[in-house]
Structures are given as C-alpha cells and as structure tokens.
Amino acid sequence: MTDRPLLLLDVDGPLNPFRARLLRHRGYVTCRVHPAKWSAKQKPGSRRRRRGLRLRLHPGHGARLLALPYDLAWAWATAWMHGANKMIGPVIGLPADLPVIEFTNLFAEDPDGLNWKTRRVVEWAAGRPFAWVDDMITDLDVRHVAEHHAGQALLLRIDPRKGLREREFTELERWARDVGPGS
C-alpha cells in the first residue's frame, strides 16, 4: 500500500466518449468488442451482434493515466468490471491486471438517488484518498462522499460527449499532488 491516492475510472463517458456527435475525436480510434452481457442481449445472427459494440478510445490515454501520481484502480468504477482489463486496457496501453471494484448492483436504482456505484466506491476506498472519474456523478454523490468518506475525495464528472481532455488530466494531477504525502 502506498501513500498515493486511488484513481477510480469509469469507461463509458471518460474513456469512451459515447455521446460524441462526431464519430472521430482527434487521436481516438474506433474498435469493436464483444462483451458477453452485451452480446447476450443481441439478436442471434444479427449484424449488430456480428460487428460488436463500437467504442472510441484514445491510445494515448493509458500512458497519461499511468503518469499521474495515483495508484490506478481499474474500476475501476465501471460496469465493464474485469472486461475493462481485457477489452479496454490493451487498446489504450494499460496493464491487463489492474484492480477492479466488484459491483453486484449494476444499474440498480438507489433509494436516495445516488449513482448506483457511489456507496460501493466509498466502501471500496476504505478511507483512502481517491479521485473518481465518471460521467454520471451528481451533486448528491459529491455530498454523500463528503459525509461518508473519511479521506479526501475528488469526484470529477466528465462530459460523455468529450471524454477525458487535457483540463481533466491537469485537474487530476494537481489534486493528487495537493493530497500527496507531506501536504
């Protein structure tokens, strides 16, 4: 265990700007993957199932994320869970064995209106400082984390039309340095 904060990443929105109007953001590549749960929901033999789920990913994001002063936790705070290590990490240059937050309540409605990941993220972080990068964070989630998490936390909402950009990388680096050892 290090003194560095955790970096908890979502895939869709931050790394895959799935709501982008333009099909090609500068530097992004389009790839097709076949996640089991997604494939199971497609009509057998359909063109959509054969082609796979389209993602737009930036091959340079892995190096940028690894250069940040964090312990990287691949979901990670994402519904992709272990699939992120297999299907996302290799495309953007991240190791294939990053830690994964296990979610058992995928997309479940929270009684207090929180993001379905929020309570599990707080529990998983166990008081350690963390930055959580997601497109579905709301003010309710920010307040909940402030009230229920003993360590410092940055909840960084990403526009799913734009994904992670230079300003977010700068904010993540600044915040981690501010909460690092000796600060």
Image: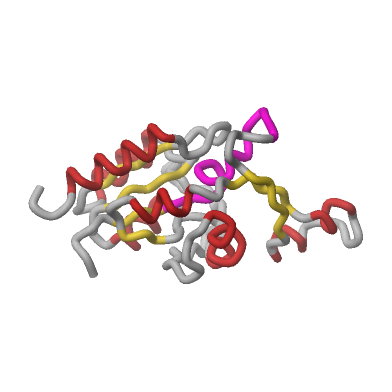
Q: Is residue 15 magenta?
A: yes
**In the rendered image, the vertical position of residue 86 relative to residue 114, given as above or below:** below
Residue 119 falls left or right of residue 126: right
> What colouring method underlies this structural image?
secondary structure
Residue 40 falls left or right of residue 98: right
Location of residue 74 (image quadrant): bottom left
The region drawn magenta spans 9-23
173 or 140: nearer the eye?
Answer: 173
Residue 29 falls left or right of residue 105: right
89 or 135: nearer the eye?
Answer: 89
Q: Is residue 80 magenta?
A: no
Q: Position of residue 73 (x, y in %)?
A: 39, 61
Q: Position of residue 34 (x, y in %)?
A: 72, 61
Q: Quadrant of the N terminus?
A: bottom left
51 or 63: nearer the eye?
Answer: 63
* Residue pictured at 45% horizontal, 47% vertical: 111
* Residue pictured at 81% horizontal, 56% vertical: 42
Q: Residue furthest right?
A: 45
Magenta region, main secondary structure: loop
- Figure label count: 0
**In the rendered image, the vertical position of residue 3 relative to residue 171, given as above or below:** below
Q: Residue furthest left?
A: 182
Q: Position of residue 149 (x, y in %)?
A: 25, 52
* Residue pictured at 54% horizontal, 32% vertical: 162
Q: Position of residue 66 (x, y in %)?
A: 38, 56
* Residue pictured at 47% horizontal, 71% vertical: 97
